[in-house]
Image: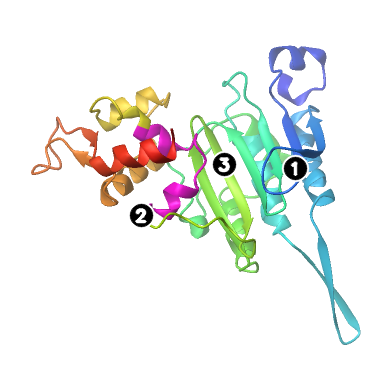
Amino acid sequence: MILFSDSLVRKGLFPYAKIECARFKGTSSDEFIDQKTIDVNLTLQAEAAYEFVLRHINQGATVEGVYTSYHWEYPIKAIREALRNAVVHRDYALSGKDIKVAVYDDMVEITSPGLLLPSIDFNELEARQSDIRNKIIAPVFKKIGIIDQWGNGLKLIADELKEYPEIDFRWFEKGLQFQLQFIKKNIPQPELQPELQPELYELPPDSLYRLILKSLSDKTRTTKEISVELGQKEISGQLKKIIRKLHKDGFLEQTIPDKPNHPSQKHKMSERGIEFLRKRFK
């Protein structure tokens, strides 16, 4: 398969089958400290990105008796697994989008083209879930030992996160991309406006929360219609979950509130949702 080669043909046909890495100064993307483009063949990309991350995070040492133990500031096994998953499961049909790895003072962020597969629930990391988007790439990675048994990857991430209570693990679907964040909890965060839901307030402007609200800003829509507008091939589990939460938190309302399961049921913005959208995403 051409994606596994280093030929100019691969770079011509799949110019975005690469990883863009960046180390930013501070907690915003305003100023670069270091950048690297990884456009080697697929089998080498995740490891090269992993080495970039290691160069820009710290490793501490503690002495216990005659032994010295080392501890990275982030769960590096989980980050390595997340990078491998990004390469194996990204949507290569999305042109103009590459994998992005960003290292900030307070966070390591991995963004991959393609939404989360509907059968995978990141709220259940320990459930040994498995699904394959790329039917050729994944078996090749497994055969050469880059990925382990199906379903072990998410379990590995969950297990190492238990050893890092100081790290907050978050995941989002943003437009047509899937994003993971490993965030230091001890970094001071901006004070939130008390009237806003923290999860919504902290999300970036192009998050799926915002896109759903914007989709409903001028009309009512069914879940299917929202899914189509967002460019999803089918309704994702994450989309349904976020819509339920937006209803629960009072940002959306049903057009037929007395019959929740009515076949003509649609979603619409509540007054609170309209006000939130106006204030937060002008």
Q: Quadrant of the N terminus?
A: top right
The residue beneath circle 2 is 195
Q: Quadrant of the C terminus?
A: top left
| x and y, in percent, of residue 156 in the image | 62, 58
Calculate the distance from the C-alpha at mark 3 to the C-alpha at mark 1. 17 Å
Residue situated in front as seen by the camera: 174 or 39? 174
Residue 146 falls in image quadrant: top right
Residue 215 left/right relative to 258: right
- At mark 3, the secondary structure is strand
- The residue depicted at 38 percent of the width and 41 percent of the height is 237
The numbered mark, 3 or 1, whose residue comes first in the sequence reads: 1
Magenta span of residues: 196-213
- At mark 2, the secondary structure is loop
The residue beneath circle 3 is 179
Indicate whether residue 124 is drawn in magenta.
no
What residue type is disc 3 on? Answer: Gln
User: Does the residue at mark 3 contact the one at mark 1 (Cβ under 8 Å)?
Assistant: no
Indicate whether residue 200 is drawn in magenta.
yes
